[in-house]
């Protein structure tokens, strides 16, 4: 197994999300301005599985997209040095061509790969792919903007 570039504590320091919405466990590869590979270990005791679905737990597509977004946030922060100040957020603006190709279930290890398509000052366009055991389970393009509240 690849040793993390950023462990869970480092990831948590870079993201605003907290339990139960923290969707990244570690980062195993990071090239500022280019790409990031992050890991999410899916466990059966996560809150979403209480209702999605009680008889057959399946990771909601919205949370898979959220994992891509959180990986992109880390990449954006490590590329620009922004997003870490109080009141600064990287907000999701667009989701395009999002496809869910196979279910993700407890016990799976999601590998989240995000590639930069374009960085413009306070905006980013990325392509995300999520795979489990080498099988592509989701893909899409997401757009973000940095905002200060």
Image (spheres, rainbow, N blue to C red):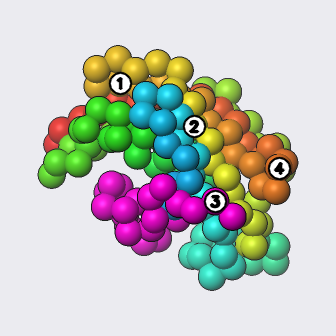
Residue 54 falls left or right of residue 42: right
Q: Badge 1 is on which residue? A: 123
Name the element at disc 2: strand
Q: Which residues are magenta?
A: 1-25
In three-dimensional space, the C-alpha distance between marks 3 and 2, rounded to whole angstroms, equals 17 Å
N-terminal label among 2 and 4: 2
Name the element at disc 4: loop
Q: Which mark is residue 3?
A: none
Q: Main secondary structure of the magenta part?
A: loop
Disc 3 residue crowd, few under 14, some 14–19, many 20+, Cα 10 Å:
few
N-terminal label among 2 and 1: 2
Q: Which mark is residue 114?
A: 2
N-terminal label among 3 and 1: 3
**Residue 80 location, quadrant:** top left
Q: Which mark is residue 134?
A: 4
Residue 119 falls left or right of residue 84: right
Name the element at disc 3: loop
Disc 1 residue crowd, few under 14, some 14–19, many 20+, Cα 10 Å:
some
Residue at image location 53% in from the left, 21% down from the top: 117
N-terminal label among 3 and 4: 3
Q: Is residue 4 above or below residue 117?
A: below
Marks 3, 2: nearer the viewer:
3
Q: Is residue 97 above or below residue 63?
A: above
Residue 24 in sight: no
N-terminal label among 4 and 1: 1
């Amino acid at each position: 197994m690849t040793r993390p570039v950023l462990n869970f504590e480092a990831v948590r320091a870079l993201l605003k999300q907290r339990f139960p919405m923290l969707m990244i466990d570690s980062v195993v590869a990071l090239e500022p301005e280019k790409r990031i590979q992050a890991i999410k270990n899916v466990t059966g005791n996560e809150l979403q599985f209480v209702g999605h679905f009680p008889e057959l737990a399946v990771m909601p597509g919205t949370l898979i997209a959220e994992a891509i977004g959180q990986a992109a946030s880390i990449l954006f922060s490590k590329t620009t040095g922004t997003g870490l100040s109080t009141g600064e957020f990287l907000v999701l603006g667009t989701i395009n061509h999002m496809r869910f190709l196979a279910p993700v279930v407890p016990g799976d290890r999601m590998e989240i790969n995000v590639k930069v398509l374009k960085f413009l000052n306070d905006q980013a366009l990325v392509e995300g792919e999520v795979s489990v055991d080498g099988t592509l389970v989701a893909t899409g393009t997401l757009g973000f903007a940095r905002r200060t509240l």
